[in-house]
Image (cartoon, rainbow, N blue to C red):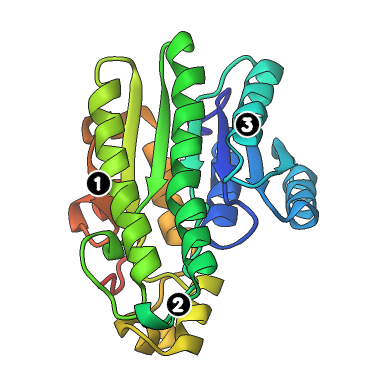
């Protein structure tokens, strides 16, 4: 069974980690997947690997801080395939990880530009394209850092808190339009972002043992499931992989998620 057969889904921030895992699972569920990120070479190789496995995948290099580039890429995939059924806003940075007084202002602003403004660009383009076709699904990657302060993470906490509020506003504005909007906290995941945190040594997640981290495939399974109709009753909510009820519905394996 391929529950997303005939659907077209774009993953922004798809070159590695959760985004790459989500792109593969979405494709395995039958969707045609557009992989987007700055690293064009990595994306091209990834898309080629998916196609070699008989899956439908395309790649486009773009910077999510460029509103026109995001909208053009999503409009183009919609035009090629006749619809744009889902957008996953996964692009994000955690740098600079340092005490606020020691941060570089340009690096701090870049984190906000990618993690918050990039999410806005993806949401704006998605809504403008999905409304005329009668609906679609938007999943914005959130974080526990959107809800609580973490030492050394001032830019990331601010960006994710802003993205959480943006998601809530968008869910309010699109209610009744056929567009489903979700925020999703993936938990502590074994990605390059966590390696950056470990190197800086700031914040509780920096000291988590490697075996406590989740593989990217587990949150990716939630993202793929949210694209399905059976997730419709959760639209408008901020969800977390720590919720046992959500894990049961997605049929995630038992393990420590906290």
Q: CA distance from mark 1 to mark 3?
A: 28 Å
Label 3 Cα neighbours within 10 Å, binned few <14 / some 14-19 / many ≥20 = some
Q: How many marks?
A: 3
Closer to us: 77 or 245: 77
How much space separates mark 3 and mark 2, taking CA atoms? 29 Å
Residue 213 in picture, x, y percent from top left: 40, 76
Query: Of label 1 and label 2, which has the lower sequence position?
Result: 2
Q: Residues within 10 Å of mark 1 (few under 14, many from 20)?
A: some
Identify residue for label 2.
Answer: 103
Q: Is residue 75 left or right of residue 174?
A: right
The percent position of residue 233, horizontal first and vertical second, equals 22, 31
- Looking at marks 3 and 2 on the same chain, the residue that comes earlier in the sequence is marked by 3
Q: Is residue 1 left or right of residue 149?
A: right
> Residue 183 lies in what quarter of the image?
top left
Q: Residue 180: horizontal and vertical position, in percent? A: 33, 28
Mark 2 secondary-structure assignment: loop
In the shown orientation, is residue 61 left or right of residue 255? right
How far apart are labels 1 and 2 at the CA level? Answer: 29 Å
Q: Residue at x 42, y 50 (%)?
A: 116
Residue 25, above or below 34: below
Which mark is nearer the camera, 3 or 2? 2
Residue, x 45% and y 80% (percent of image)? Answer: 197
Disc 3 marks which residue?
68
Front one among 235 and 251:
235
- Quick one: SS at disc 3? helix
Residue 60: x and y in percent read: 73, 41
Say left or right for 45 vs 1: right
Of labels 1 and 3, earlier in sequence is 3
Task: Say above or below: 226 vs 99.
Answer: above
Task: Give the SS element for disc 1.
Answer: strand
The residue that mark 1 highlights is: 238
């Amino acid at each position: 069974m391929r529950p997303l057969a005939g659907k077209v889904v774009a993953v922004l921030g798809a070159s590695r980690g959760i985004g790459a895992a989500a792109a593969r699972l979405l494709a395995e569920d039958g969707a045609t997947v557009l992989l987007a990120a700055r690293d064009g070479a990595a994306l091209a190789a990834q898309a080629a690997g998916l196609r070699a496995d008989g899956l439908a995948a395309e790649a486009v290099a773009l910077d999510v801080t460029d509103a026109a580039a995001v909208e053009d890429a999503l409009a183009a995939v919609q035009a090629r395939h006749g619809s744009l059924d889902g957008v996953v806003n996964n692009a994000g940075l955690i740098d600079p990880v340092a005490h606020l007084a020691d941060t570089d202002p340009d690096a701090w602003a870049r984190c906000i530009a990618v993690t918050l403004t990039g999410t806005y660009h993806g949401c704006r383009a998605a809504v403008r394209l999905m409304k005329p076709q009668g609906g679609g699904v938007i999943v914005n990657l959130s974080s526990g850092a959107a809800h609580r302060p973490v030492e050394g993470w001032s830019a990331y906490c601010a960006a994710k808190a802003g993205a959480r509020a943006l998601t809530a506003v968008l869910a309010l504005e699109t209610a009744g339009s056929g567009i489903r909007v979700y925020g999703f906290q993936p938990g502590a995941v074994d990605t390059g972002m966590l390696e950056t945190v470990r190197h800086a040594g700031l914040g509780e997640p920096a000291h988590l043992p490697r075996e406590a981290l989740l593989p990217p495939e587990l949150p990716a399974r939630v993202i793929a499931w949210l694209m399905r109709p059976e997730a419709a009753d959760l639209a408008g909510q901020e969800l977390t992989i720590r919720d046992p009820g959500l894990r049961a519905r997605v049929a995630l394996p038992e393990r420590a998620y906290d």
